[in-house]
């Protein structure tokens, strides 16, 4: 099993494993995510990163889950990785060095949830205007409409 192989490689990397909806789900120690992803790509041929997203568990702690969906095209096998992050200053290493496709996915999570990706080559907003205040997919973000003053150049 993949979880056992990863544990044999680094006993502290895999915090939990389960199977659901026909996919293996691994909880990975946040500080190990880049190394685990590199190993899964190089040694286990998970060549495709399908998505990076987040879940806000507010008011629970750890507050955020960062979710990575990986796909081995040659074996048609999928694995879901999850890392838990605290609500205060959530940060995790970028996996753009493993898959270039992580670039925009990580920017989206940063923009909408406020999670910072260390060593990201261009971490800035991707959906919201650069001067937007807050992160709209956080559960504590105000649910009322916010009026945004567009500059004359964008009208």
Image: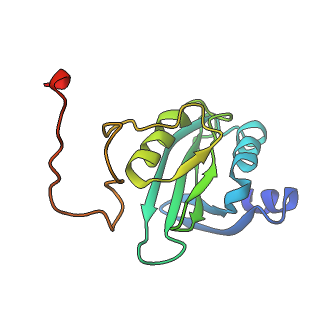
Instruction: Tell me residue 45's x, y (percent).
Output: 70, 37
- Residue at 58% of width from left, 65% of height from top? 84
Q: Is residue 135 left or right of residue 151?
A: right
For image coordinates 47% across by 62% down, the residue present is 21
Q: Nearer the viewer, residue 142 or 53?
A: 142
**The image quarter in which residue 143 lies:** bottom left
Residue at x 72% of width, y 45% of height: 40
Q: Nearer the viewer, residue 18 or 133?
A: 133
Q: Say left or right for 96 vs 61.
A: right
Image spot of residue 127 (x, y percent): 33, 38
Residue 140 location in percent, x, y? 33, 68
Position of the C terminus, as image quadrant, is top left
Q: Quadrant of the N terminus?
A: bottom right
How many numbered marks, from 0 up?
A: 0
With respect to residue 5, does 19 lie above or below? below
Residue found at the very far bottom of the displayed protein: 60
- Measured along the vertical axis of the image, is residue 114 above or below residue 124? below
Q: Residue at x 46, y 47 (%)?
A: 110
| Coloration of the structure image | rainbow
């Amino acid at each position: 099993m993949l979880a056992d192989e990863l544990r044999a490689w680094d006993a502290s990397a895999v915090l939990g494993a389960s199977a659901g909806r026909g996919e293996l789900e691994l909880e990975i120690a946040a500080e190990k995510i880049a190394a685990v992803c590199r190993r899964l790509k190089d040694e286990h041929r998970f060549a495709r990163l399908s998505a990076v997203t987040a879940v806000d568990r507010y008011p629970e702690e750890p507050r955020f889950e960062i979710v990575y969906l990986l796909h081995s095209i040659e074996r048609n096998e999928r694995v879901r990785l999850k890392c838990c992050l605290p609500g205060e200053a959530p940060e995790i290493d970028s996996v753009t060095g493993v898959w270039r496709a992580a670039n925009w996915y990580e920017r989206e999570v940063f923009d909408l949830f406020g999670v910072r990706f260390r060593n990201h080559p261009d971490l800035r907003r991707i959906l919201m205007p650069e001067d937007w205040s807050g992160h709209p997919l956080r559960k504590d973000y105000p649910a009322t409409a916010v009026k945004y003053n567009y500059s004359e150049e964008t009208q």
